[in-house]
Amino acid sequence: MISFVPPGRSGDEEYVAQVADLVNVVYAAAEEGLWIEGTERTSPAEVASIIAAGELVAAGSDGEPAGVARVRRLPTGEGELGMLVADPERRGAGIGRALVAYAEGWAGDRGLRTMQLELLVPQAWTHPVKQFLYDWYTRIGYQVVRKGDLADDFPALVPRLATPCDFLVFHKQL
């Protein structure tokens, strides 16, 4: 089952910590070598904020998240899918695909015609997870619409990079 996490759950410290831990574990492997040692993708405070804003979608039926994603409407009118993760122990079960489909359906139901997602990729070498994601996103209909510099969108993150990276923005017409 996939649904938006109720905003009231932002105060559930145990659940918020579970989500933050899941995101950080997945991103530690998915972005290994991109960040300086000890950099985490998110914090419980950020996760609580995303839940409170009504922007966290979770997959799972046993009370523990099997996967999550941030889904929201951007001020520019696109839907945005971010922080997409699936529990490593449940990979291959279609959780990521189901979360993407849910997010796209949510956006389409609100009359949004474009879905956006972002991918950080190293400039000088090929990261296997990033290449897998790039290939998967393009296979399911996303196209790169902008190749930028992380400093333009997230300047505070740049000092934490361990290697120069390109910041790719993908769009899919819904």
Image (cartoon, helix red, strand yellow):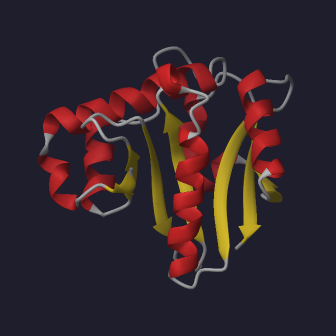
Q: Residue furthest bottom?
A: 111
Q: Residue at x 65, y 21 (%)?
A: 162
The answer to which image quadrant residue 124 occupies is top right
The answer to which image quadrant residue 47 occupies is top left
Q: Position of residue 159 (x, y in %)?
A: 57, 32
Q: Residue furthest top?
A: 37
- Left or right: 136 as drawn, with respect to 55: right
Q: Is residue 31 visible?
A: no
Q: Residue at x 78, y 58 (%)?
A: 142
Asked if 28 appears above or below 108 in the picture, the reply is above
Q: Position of residue 30 (x, y in %)?
A: 62, 25
- Left or right: 5 as drawn, with respect to 119: left
- Left or right: 12 as drawn, with respect to 144: left
Asked if 96 appears above or below 102 in the picture, the reply is above
- Left or right: 62 as drawn, with respect to 91: left
The answer to which image quadrant residue 114 occupies is bottom right
Q: Residue at x 31, y 41 (%)?
A: 61
Asked if 102 appears above or below 110 in the picture, the reply is above
Quadrant of the drawing holding the C terminus: bottom right
Q: Position of residue 172 (x, y in %)?
A: 74, 66
Q: Position of residue 150 (x, y in %)?
A: 67, 46
How many numbered marks have been drawn onto this rendered protein structure? 0
Q: Looking at the image, which is closer to me, 118 or 14? A: 14
